[in-house]
Amino acid sequence: MALGAAACLAAIPAGAATPASPTNAPTIPASPATPVLDQDFPDPDVVKVGGVYHAYATNAHGRNIRHATSTDLVHWTVDATDVLPQVGAWVTLDPPGRVWAPEVFDNGDGFTLQYTARDRAGGRQCIGAAVASSPDGPFRPAGDGPLVCTPEQGGSIDASSYTENGARHLLWKSDGNCCEQDTWLHIQSVSWDGTRVTGDPVRLFKQDRFWEGGLVEAPTLVKRDGRYVLLYSAGDYRTDAYTTGWATADSLTGPYVKGDLPLMTTTSFSGAMGGPGGQDVVTGPDGRDRILFHGYGADRSRRVLYVADVGFADGRPVVRGSKVLHEAELARVHRATVRDAKDAWGGRAVGYIDHPDSYVEFRVFAASSGPHTLTVRYGNGSLDASGAPAAATHTLTVNGAAAGAVDYPYTGWDEWKVREVPVELRDGWNTVRLSKGERHTELDAVEVA
């Protein structure tokens, strides 16, 4: 069974403490509506060297690979040079500007850059490697040919590195969408410097969700809470339909179980940016996880760089500012009724929240503490004493503390609308309770961003 966002409703363990927020955290935007680097910087990959973060991006402005540095992931300085001035002899640069999706890591004796480019021999995209003594480059080609090249599968793109128990693994995508084939994400053993394959590729999963738009790509693998969490991008990167998904597994090679709903979409960010994807996860200066990704801002001609807090709810990713759906019928329902409901999400809603002690209580996870937005999807068919349509309310409490009321204009029964209210959440698990207020309102779901 696939794991959806509603899985975040799992109970908080009894007596579990909520982690305190670090006091020395850099200023990360509460919601990534504003890019931290407002330049064309797609497919970001980030590596920390000492106290400096080095970010690398797909070709732009005449450079094969773009490079920028930061000490806090918020303020960036862009390198004026090309850190990959020369590609492998196997690459055709006709047309020019076709070097994509860099992956950089410390190999112990220097740094390795893996990149995607078009193979001169087969005409398909393949993955190559280059090395340098410094993260600033210049990186020089390693080997006589591509690192991974599978023209029979449409090519190989989007290298990503993962290490465990002293072994390095390469994740990559078969580029089948070029030629009416499936797209698979793979994992494959490579040498420690990432310039030679040492094992056969293992298929992890392919596109099979309607929202994936026919392809999966750009894998990023981390291990949190004892589980492997594989983030990936899906859909057409040229459009707002580009999105970020996730899957989890108990072992490195799977099986991976996808989330029912994506992690980041244009809609989940309320249109603050378009097509979030090409993600990478890094540890911030305060020791907390951050996710960096590209998206379309006001200028639709370029994909700019965003950063957000990311947390893991028992291994499941949650991004600050990206709405997470919680269905009311899956929450804790007290003295109320779950019923089939026309046009409700999931086909069910909670009604008859009519008694003084009636409530629906949601357990929600926040990637970091601070102000969040609670969006309530409701239906209100209340009438006043004269039989006229009337407004209604629910009483709101957060982590047991009174947080005001949610006002619901009249909609009619099974006519679902939304109300947004600000809530203050702590880092980690929280309880949000909507209780009987004035008149009567039914609940379909809440979203937390």
Image: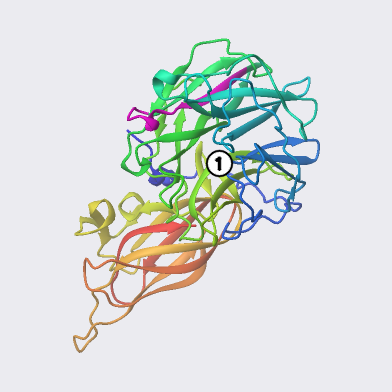
Category of crowding for the residue at label 1, using alpha-carbon neighbours closer than 10 angstroms: few (below 14), some (14–19), many (at least 20): many
Q: Is residue 320 left or right of residue 337?
A: right
Q: Is residue 425 left or right of residue 245?
A: right
Residue at coordinates 51% horizontally, 60% vertically from top-left? Answer: 272
What is the span of residues highlighted in magenta in the rendered image? 168-182
> Label 1 sits on what residue type?
Gln
Q: Is residue 159 left or right of residue 239?
A: right
- Residue 431 % position (x, y): 48, 55
Residue 99: % across, % down: 59, 34
- Dividing the picture into quadrants, the one containing residue 184 is top left
- Image quarter where the N terminus lies is top left
Asked if one can make out residue 363 in the rendered structure from this viewpoint, the answer is yes
**At 57% from the left edge and 49% from the top edge, which residue is drawn?**
367
The reply to whether the magenta stretch includes residue 192 is no
In this view, 304 is above or below 256: below
Residue 357 position by quadrant: bottom left
**Above/below status of 187 relative to 439:** above
Nearer to us in this view, 90 or 245:
90
Closer to us: 431 or 315: 315
Q: Which residue is denoted by mark 1 in the rendering?
A: 279
Residue at horizontal 38%, vertical 44%? 261
Residue 45 spot, x, y in % from top left: 63, 37
